[in-house]
Image (cartoon, rainbow, N blue to C red):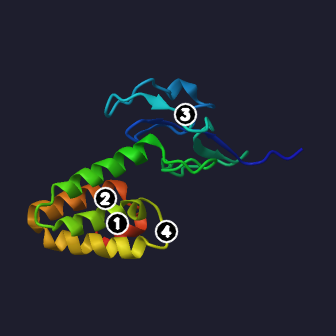
Amino acid sequence: MTQMARYDVGLVCLNGHGINSSAASSPEFNAKCCKKCGQPGVDACLKCSTKIRGSCHIPGVVSFASWDVPSFCHECGAAYPWTERRSAALVEAIGELEELSDAERQHLTASVPDVLSDTPKTQTATARFKKAIGKTGQIGGKLLTDILTKVATEAVVKSIGM
């Protein structure tokens, strides 16, 4: 019988720091709390209880591939707590941008889901954020840029030039 590739279980803190990408097969590396921020770790979706996908193991193959902490549950599609927290941080930062009109802040806030995941509206959302970064000056632009580099998809980060 041929063994198939399988995913291990990922252990991630509530702020999105990966604690252990092989929580099931290497539990000796598990920790109750994150060493970076002190938040507790979870190994399953809080909405549907499906285990978080960790590293992919292929029998007979040694992998040195890095593990990207997922943003959304592969089973139910719900945002993980760290994705929700990142979204809230970005919305809060947008609220601080006094250089923008209320309408501009509302448009940016409405665009947050589209920079957190790849959607048909991601390019438009990216253009809005680029415009806002240019309009908000050094402090506001840096605030948006710093948060976007941590929360946005790789395509958005590259498109904005960060």
Label 1 with label 3: CB-CB less than 8 Å: no
User: Which of the 4 quarters of the picture holds residue 109?
Assistant: bottom left
- Cα separation, mark 1 vs mark 3, equals 27 Å
Q: Which residue is mark 3?
A: 43
- What numbered label is drawn on residue 119? 4
Label 1 with label 2: CB-CB less than 8 Å: yes
Mark 3: secondary structure:
loop
Mark 1: secondary structure:
helix
Pick whichever of labels 1 and 3 is earlier in the sequence.
3
Q: Is 142 drawn above or below residue 127 in the view shown? A: above
Residue 14 visible somewhere in the drawing: yes
Say which residue appears at 44% left-offset and 72% top-offset.
121
Pick whichever of labels 2 and 3 is earlier in the sequence.
3
Q: Position of residue 132 (x, y in %)?
A: 21, 70
Which residue type carries mark 2?
Thr
- Cα separation, mark 2 vs mark 3, equals 25 Å
Label 2 with label 3: CB-CB less than 8 Å: no
- Cα separation, mark 1 vs mark 4, equals 15 Å
Which residue type carries mark 4?
Thr
Q: Is 128 drawn above or below residue 61 in the view shown? A: below
Q: Give the position of the N terminus as an image quadrant.
A: top right
Local packing at callout 2 (Cα closer than 10 Å; few below 14, some 14-19, many 20+) is some
Label 1 with label 4: CB-CB less than 8 Å: no
Q: Which residue is mark 1?
A: 157
- What numbered label is drawn on residue 141? none
- Cα separation, mark 2 vs mark 4, equals 18 Å
Q: Give the position of the C terminus as an image quadrant.
A: bottom left
Say which residue appears at 10% left-offset and 60% top-offset.
139
Q: Which residue is mark 2?
A: 149
Label 4 with label 3: CB-CB less than 8 Å: no
Say which residue appears at 40% left-offset and 26% top-offset.
33
- Cα separation, mark 4 vs mark 3, equals 26 Å
